[in-house]
Amino acid sequence: MNTDRDELIAMLPKMLRDLASDFDVDTAMRLVAWRGGRGLYVPSAVSSKHQIAKHIGLPAAQWLVEHYGESNILVDRASALLRHLRDLEMHERNQAGMSLNKLAEEYDLSQRQVLDRLARFRADPTPDLFS
């Protein structure tokens, strides 16, 4: 991870910061997309069939259980920062040689969406945290 990404991840609320650090930004984004701005009850155990695991994957769901099991948590929105981190990550991976097709597959986007995000990032790599 580079310093810019470290600084941006440090700006995330603690739970999302820890999740993004232990897994990846995309996992934190999926949690925000699903429950951002709302509460979430984390049970004492989850299986692959549990709704949390279906949204963020079983390993990340088990991480939530380990850290927040048997409690209600508020999932922060932080979506603008997470989008910027994802776009930064896509840009870095593209610069390292990852193809548009592979990026589209990895991020579950169309190639057009990947191209649009890369173009926007290259035009202005500063995060717009207030959108």
Image (tube, rainbow, N blue to C red):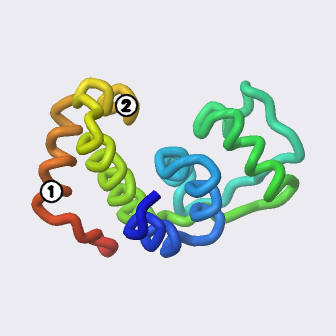
User: Which class describes the residues within 10 Å of circle 2: few (<14), some (14-19), or many (20+)?
Assistant: few
The amino acid beneath tag 2 is Asp
Left or right of 17, for residue 2 = left
The amino acid beneath tag 1 is Arg
Q: Is residue 24 above or below residue 112?
A: below
Q: In this view, does 98 lie above or below 90?
A: above
Q: Position of residue 72 (x, y in %)?
A: 77, 61
Quadrant containing the C terminus is bottom left
The mark closer to the camera, 1 or 2, is 1
Residue displayed at 21% across by 38% down: 113
Q: How far apart are marks 1 and 2 (CA)?
A: 21 Å
Given residues 36 and 6, the one toward you in this image is 6
Residue displayed at 49% across by 64% down: 77
Read off the residue under disc 2: 108
Left or right of 51, for residue 5 = left
Residue displayed at 32% across by 42% down: 93
Read off the residue under disc 1: 122
Q: Is tag 1's residue or tag 2's residue first in the polypeptide sequence?
A: 2
Q: Where is residue 60 in the image (x, y as percent from the top left)?
A: 67, 43
Q: In this view, does 123 lie above or below 118?
A: below
